Image (cartoon, rainbow, N blue to C red):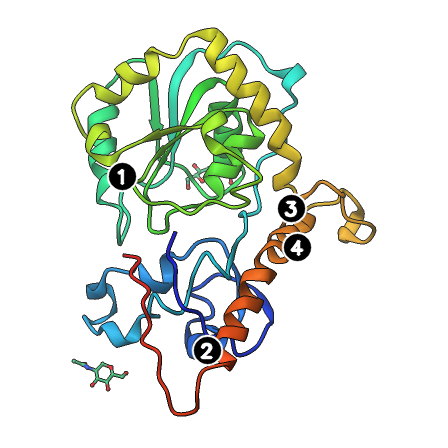
Amino acid sequence: MCLCSLVVLKLEAFLADPVAMWHVRAEIAPAVLLVVDFGGWYRLESKSWNGNSSDVIQHTQVSLLKDVIVPYTHLLPRLQLTENKKRQTLLYFKGAKHRHRGGLVREKLWDLLVNEPDVVMEEGFPNATGREQSIKGMRTSKFCLHPAGDTPTSCRLFDAIQSLCIPVIVSDNIELPFEGIVDYSEFSVFVAVDDALKPNWLVRHLRTFHKEHSDRFRQKMAQFQPLFEYDNGHPGGIGPIPPDGAVNHVWKKVYQKLPMIKEAIIRERRKPPGVSVPRRCHCT
Ligand SMILES: *[C@@H]1O[C@H](CO)[C@@H](O)[C@H](O)[C@H]1NC(C)=O
Ligand SMILES: *[C@@H]1O[C@H](CO)[C@@H](O)[C@H](O)[C@H]1NC(C)=O
């Protein structure tokens, strides 16, 4: 976590894909941002943006101190723990092999894993067939691969959770929603990119998880399923939100950040006029 000296000019909340809010990034940076990840803000490879680093939001402008990571909406239906059946496939991944940026790991992993027995890597279609494929894949596999893609997170992780498929997160640096409320290590496997790219390493590692271990992970995951639910189940979404769902947890996180934001504002106000305090945030 980075300890930035924050300048909070206004307190507003936005639910935004960072890239979608690109053109107003300077104006909204001081606000409390609700984002699915910081990928679009400061982790972009500079060459994707004409090599001009001033086009990229500075890391002093986003921070886990003030901003809230929110989950993607999952696309697959929830599998209840009681409906869980025996899973034959060890590891499942569906998605594009190639990614335009930051997806080199994915491509290498694909080549390493595609011919492994018990591993299913499939290219998907963005239609009903693809959806059926994902539901089947995620419900019949013990583990679901979550490689670094073009953004550190995607709906894949939340689909895996709803399908009770143990997420295998291959990313050295990922921001996840509701951390502090959710301990992802209780139901996910975190793998360093270097390890994942060693031939046979990942499959061998996953095989060391015994049934009791996986069952424990799956029970924990089932407890957290409702937390990632935006949908209240009413037609058109009209009606009360589920009290233990995603929306209330977003507000809980905003509420938790307020004391730190208030402190930063007070510190900022007491500065003698004309003094500029250097920003000290060094989060890479
Ligand atoms: C980078 O962008 C800034 C502002 O958008 C501009 O002033 C500067 O000339 C650009 N630099 C390069 C090398 O393109
Ligand atoms: C989905 O797309 C694939 C590839 O284009 C196609 O073969 C399949 O029939 C499509 N399925 C549906 C339900 O449209």
Residue at the image point whose x is 49% and y is 74% from the top: 267
Front in this rendered view, residue 222 or 120: 222
Where's residue 201, x and y in %? 22, 20
Nearer the observer: mark 4 or 1; the answer is 4
Q: CA distance from mark 4 to mark 1?
A: 33 Å
Q: CA distance from mark 4 to mark 3?
A: 9 Å
Question: Given the image, on which type of amino acid does mark 1 rest?
Answer: Arg
Residue 106: mark in rendering = 1
Where's residue 251, x and y in %? 66, 55
Residue 246: mark in rendering = 3
Residue 24: mark in rendering = 2
Helix, strand or loop for disc 3: helix
Q: CA distance from mark 2 to mark 4?
A: 23 Å
Residue at the image point whose x is 53% and y is 48% from the top: 72
Relative side of 104 to 276, left or right: left
Nearer the observer: mark 2 or 1; the answer is 2
Residue 44: mark in rendering = none
When the figure is inspected, residue 10 is found, relative to residue 4, above or below; the finding is below
